[in-house]
Structure formats: structure tokens, C-alpha cells
Amino acid sequence: MSFNKSIKKIIDEADGEVDLCDRAISDITEYISPLSRVSHLTRLTLSHNKLTNLPTTISEIKGLEALNLFNNHLESLPLSINDLQKLKHLNVAVNRLWELPRGFGACPMLQVLDITYNNLTELPNNFHYLNTLRALYLGDNDFKVVPQEVTRLKNLQILSLRDNHLTELPPAIGQMSKLTELLIQNNFLTTLPIELTQTDLANPKNVFRADGNPFQDELQRHIETGVAQTFQFLKSAEYAKILENTSPVDQSNATKDKTLKKSRKGQKK
């Protein structure tokens, strides 16, 4: 790979932040060493490029706090990303990720993780160790169930699960006491767990979005009237009876045509 002079100039003149957005970069391996020498580099933007992989040497940029890889062609992330011990914000939305690396929960300072618009169906077993995580965006992936690792994130405030293949929410979501925003639009949900009322999502200051689901008729009517009315209904004896007589959508039928997505053109190896 020839070392692009304009990119080299950007790196050489940088102080604290490097923005390499929309530079048609397909490989950053040769840029890692000069990037690691940038004074106080805390933010690296590589969005809207053509990256198919992230080199393991990314961990050499020790002080990195924000890494933006939005809209590339990544199918995986290196295990060494766990070594970015100061990383607080990671954006890998609009890629082709099939999985996150083992040990991903070892990022001790991660606060915001955006994995929207990928191909994920599960999360690493130690994902719940991300105790500092406050915002998690999992929208537009291929989740059929909410990973239990998510409901164990006790400090999470924002959770987006919109546009997946979910047929039900787990009762454990009620234990996520710090949730202030929950987005579950456009799934295959027919009911909501009563335990959802244990959260503070009915507070007018908070955000709960659930449109675009095939909810049971009476529940749908309450959802259309507002969040507070919906949560009151979830506590009612009438709703308890509805739960007894309603089955979730068959997961084998909970699929959507996502073949037109650019990020899904890569094939799983």
C-alpha cells in the first residue's frame, strides 16, 4: 500500500484528534504507527471508508477514547480492541459484523457502543462486565431474543433493540432500573412483560417507543394512547389474563427481508 501523502499530512499535523472520514481507505495498517505517535490522540474517525478489517495493532494507540468506524465493510473486530483500556465511545454501525470478539467485556471504560445495522445474533458471554456502559445501540441486527448479557447491564440508560426479530422481551428487563430510553420498534412482539413496569420508563421525561409490532389488540390500543396508560394497563388483572392466553410469534416466522442492505452484502466465512 502506498502511503497517501494527504493522509500523512493530516496525521502529522494532528493534535488530539484525527479525522479520516470518507477517504476511500481500505487498509489502515501502515497508518497505525504514525497514529500512535500523534500527541494526545484521543479521537480517531474512520467513518465512510472501505475498511474490511481492523489490524490487531490498533491497540498501539493507547490513549484512544473514541473510535468511529461507522459505514465500512468490517465483518469482525480484532481481539486486541480489548486492549484499548481508555476507550469510551465505539461506533461500528453500518458494517457487516457477524460477532464481537471474545472477551469484549474487558473494555473497562466503555460508555457508548453503537453496533446498529450489522448481522449480530448474539453477544459474547462476558459482555455484561461492561459496567460503565450507559448507551447500547443494537438496532437493525438479527437478534431473535434479547441476550441475557444485556439485561445484566445494571448501569445502562439507553437501549435500542429496534428493527430486529424479537418475539418477546425477557422479564429480566424489569431489573434494568436505570433505563431512561428503550427502543423496541419494528419487531415481532405481541405482548410486553409485566416486569417492564418496574422501570421508570413511564416517566414523561423518559423515552419508550414500541410502534411497528403486532401487539395483541387491547395492548395496541393502550400503546396508541400513551406510555403512562400502557404501563397502567400492564399492571391490570385484564392484562394478566391476556398474557395467559397469548403466545409469542413463532420465531421461525420472525424474519425480515434485509437483503437490500449494503452492510449485509458480505457473506459469512
Image (tube, grey):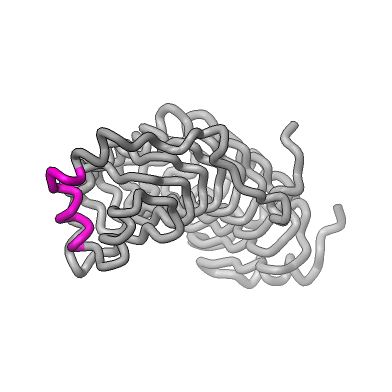
Quadrant hosting residue 46? bottom right
Residue 233 as seen in the image, left or right of residue 34: left
Find residue 66 and report its horizontal and vertical position in percent. Answer: 48, 58
Looking at the image, which residue is at 54% across and 40% down?
254
Q: In terms of depth relative to the viewer, which is nearer, 213 or 89?
A: 213
Q: Which residues are magenta?
A: 228-239
Q: Main secondary structure of the magenta part?
A: helix
Residue 72 as seen in the image, left or right of residue 219: right
Q: In terms of depth relative to the viewer, which is nearer, 104 or 85?
A: 104
Q: In terms of depth relative to the viewer, which is nearer, 251 or 260?
A: 251
Looking at the image, which residue is at 25% across and 41% down?
242
Residue 255 as seen in the image, left or right of residue 203: right
Find residue 139 and report its horizontal and vertical position in percent. Answer: 49, 52
Is residue 208 on the magenta stretch?
Answer: no
Q: In terms of depth relative to the viewer, which is nearer, 111 or 166?
A: 166
Residue 263 visible to an observer of this rendering: yes
Residue 29 visible to an observer of this rendering: no
Find residue 208 and report its horizontal and vertical position in percent. Answer: 30, 60
Find residue 263 and report its horizontal and vertical position in percent. Answer: 69, 52
- Residue 143 vs 200, above or below: the answer is above
Looking at the image, which residue is at 72% across and 50% down?
259
